[in-house]
């Protein structure tokens, strides 16, 4: 028998307990998001839908690799007098989504602060620190995407940090309020309206639409109508509800375009933490920790935890 020093045993137990605690869902925050308005609209769509149930034979073909684009998102920019102006990319041809998010005064101030900081060279994005983009930002990401469809469950997979959305189509409702808590990808249920996937999502974490775009709160909830409009385009029309960040519901349309080159393209598992050396400095700016600097993490070195397992 190998005698292991007590100090190492205690340390190993502490690490194990800490790891287990990290894996437990965070339940210190009971979700109180009011999604009654979007839920009523969703239920009305469901009542008028054709073919709410789906069979394997009728499932639309969304196979392949797709990519989104933040260009479909109307952006705010600062004018010379410090007010918010709307920027619309030429790629965004949808009249219904050329209006930027109708922000409440508090969230207008947040957007102005971010843009003012950028003019000073202060630029920080939580995604740089290997935090998932989360939903609804998931939709505007330009990373590669795949869609896996079954009659009762749809998976939406994003290359960025291997983020996965799960859309439950088996008739269930959302998690009860006393069991719900904020999630990076939210809690989604859906149904089919012909070949259109209708999705209702609640219980999201707060975030931003892009690194320099407006923020949304953890009260954000959405309805999406997703359909394949031709062999190379999937369209997502989203109505966003957020009583903290928005003065009224906001509709915006995104598209995912098929990626055909190379023909054998595959999405790989993306572990951002493996080689992340980006931290936020004392000014709030992004700082890349270089080899030799304090705090640099060498991806080629084994961690202390790995050494314990030897």
Image (spheres, rainbow, N blue to C red):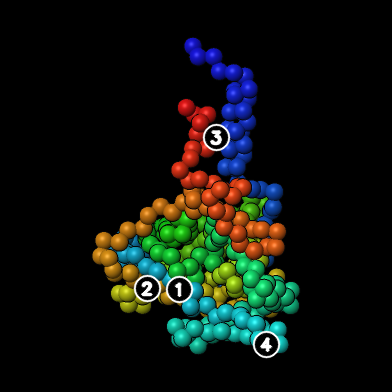
Q: Where does label 3 land, which residue?
A: 304
- Residue at x 60%, y 73% (from the top left corner): 213
Mark found first going from the N terminus, 2 or 3? 2
Element marked by disc 1 = loop
Q: CA distance from mark 3 to mark 1?
A: 40 Å
x and y percent of residue 128 in the render?
Answer: 56, 60
Point 54% across, 67% down: residue:
137
| Vertical comparison of 155 with 261: above or below | above
- Foreground label between 2 and 4: 4
Q: Secondary structure at mark 4?
A: loop
Q: Are marks 2 and 1 in contact (CB under 8 Å)?
A: yes
The disc, 4 or 1, on the residue closer to the chain's N-terminal end is 1
Left-right relation of 87 to 198? right
Q: Outermost residue, top direction?
A: 1
The vertical placement of 80 against 6, above or below, is: below
Asked if residue 85 is positioned above or below residue 225 in the image, the reply reads below
Question: Is label 3 or label 1 in front?
Answer: 3
Residue 60 visible in the shown view: no
In the picture of the structure, the residue carrying the numbered disc 4 is: 80
- Residue at mark 2: 257
Residue at position x 55%, y 18% from top?
4
Please state which of the two labelled residues, at mark 2 or mark 1, is closer to the viewer: 1
Contact between labelled residues 4 and 3, with CB atoms less than 8 Å apart: no
Which of the 4 image quadrants contains residue 201? bottom right
The residue drawn where x is 64% and y is 63% is: 285
Return the disc, 2 or 1, that comes first in the chain's sequence: 1
Q: Residues within 10 Å of mark 4 (few under 14, many from 20)?
A: few
The residue identified by callout 1 is: 69
Q: Residue furthest front?
A: 292
Q: Distance from label 3 to label 4 (Cα)? A: 52 Å
Q: CA distance from mark 4 to mark 1?
A: 28 Å
């Amino acid at each position: 028998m190998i005698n292991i020093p007590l100090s190492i045993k205690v340390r190993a137990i502490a690490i194990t307990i800490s790891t287990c605690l990290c894996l437990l869902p965070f339940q210190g925050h009971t979700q109180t998001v009011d999604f009654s308005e979007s839920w009523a609209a969703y239920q009305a769509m469901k009542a008028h839908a054709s073919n709410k149930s789906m069979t394997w034979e009728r499932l639309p073909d969304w196979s392949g690799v797709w990519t989104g684009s933040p260009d479909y998102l109307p952006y705010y920019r600062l004018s010379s007098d410090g007010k918010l102006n709307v920027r619309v990319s030429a790629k965004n041809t949808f009249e219904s989504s050329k209006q930027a998010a109708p922000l409440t005064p508090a969230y207008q101030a947040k957007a102005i602060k971010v843009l003012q900081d950028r003019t000073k060279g202060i630029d920080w994005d939580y995604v740089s620190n290997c935090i998932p983009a989360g939903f609804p930002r998931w939709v505007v990401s330009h990373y590669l995407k795949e869609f896996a469809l079954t009659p009762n469950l749809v998976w939406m997979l994003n290359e960025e940090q291997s983020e996965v959305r799960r859309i439950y189509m088996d008739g269930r409702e959302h998690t009860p309020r006393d069991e719900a808590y904020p999630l990076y990808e939210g809690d989604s249920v859906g149904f089919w309206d012909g070949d259109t996937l209708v999705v209702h999502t609640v219980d999201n974490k707060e975030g931003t639409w892009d690194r320099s775009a407006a923020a949304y709160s953890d009260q954000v909830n959405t309805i999406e109508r997703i359909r394949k409009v031709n062999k190379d385009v999937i369209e997502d029309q989203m109505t966003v509800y957020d009583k903290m960040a928005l003065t009224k519901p906001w509709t915006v349309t995104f598209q995912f375009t098929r990626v055909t080159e190379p023909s054998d393209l595959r999405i790989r598992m993306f572990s951002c933490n493996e080689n992340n050396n980006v931290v936020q400095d004392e000014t709030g700016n992004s700082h890349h920790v270089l080899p030799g600097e304090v705090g640099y993490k060498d991806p080629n070195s084994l961690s202390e935890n790995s050494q314990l397992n030897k």
